[in-house]
Amino acid sequence: MPKHLHLEEIVQPAAQLFGTRFKKRRKALGLSQVQLFEETGISAGYLSNIENGRANPTLDMMVKLAAAVGMEIWDMLRPCPEQVTEESDAD
């Protein structure tokens, strides 16, 4: 009998973290998924899946999306985003 895969077995934690941060940043910038589709060529439906943790985007796609919202990919995947702000303030 085949084993059924659950969503959490397919989508990796890094992809979920990226999606959550991407959505937050997109909304903070007041951008719609359609606007990002026009800029990146990534469909609004797939963007929704990324943002909601239902997709596991490639590294190249994450780099493209991070750049589209003015972020570096490292900042989108960093374990604690508060450290990014604190480190920037300390410079």
Image (spheres, grey):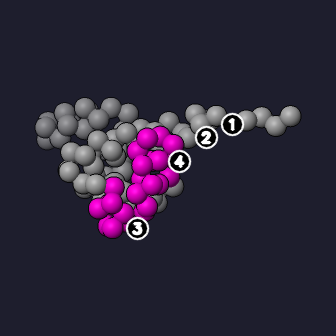
Q: Which residue is mark 3?
A: 41
Distance Cα–Cα, label 3 vs label 4: 17 Å
Q: Secondary structure at mark 1?
A: loop
**Viewer-closest of 79 and 12:** 12
User: In the image, which residues are magenta?
Assistant: 33-57
Tell me the quadrant of the picture where the N terminus can be found: top right
**Viewer-closest of 27 and 79:** 27
Q: Secondary structure at mark 2?
A: helix
Residue 16: image location, x then y, percent: 46, 39
Q: Which residue is mark 4?
A: 56
Tell me the quadrant of the picture where the C terminus can be found: top left
Q: Which residue is mark 2?
A: 10
Amino acid carrying mark 3 in the image: Gly
Q: Is residue 91 left or right of residue 74?
A: left
Check whether the beta carbons of the residues at disc 2 and disc 4 lie within 8 A of each other.
yes
> Which residue is depicted at the point 25% across and 46% down?
27
Q: Which is more N-terminal, label 4 or label 2?
A: 2
Residue 45: image location, x then y, percent: 45, 55
Check whether the beta carbons of the residues at disc 2 and disc 1 lie within 8 A of each other.
yes
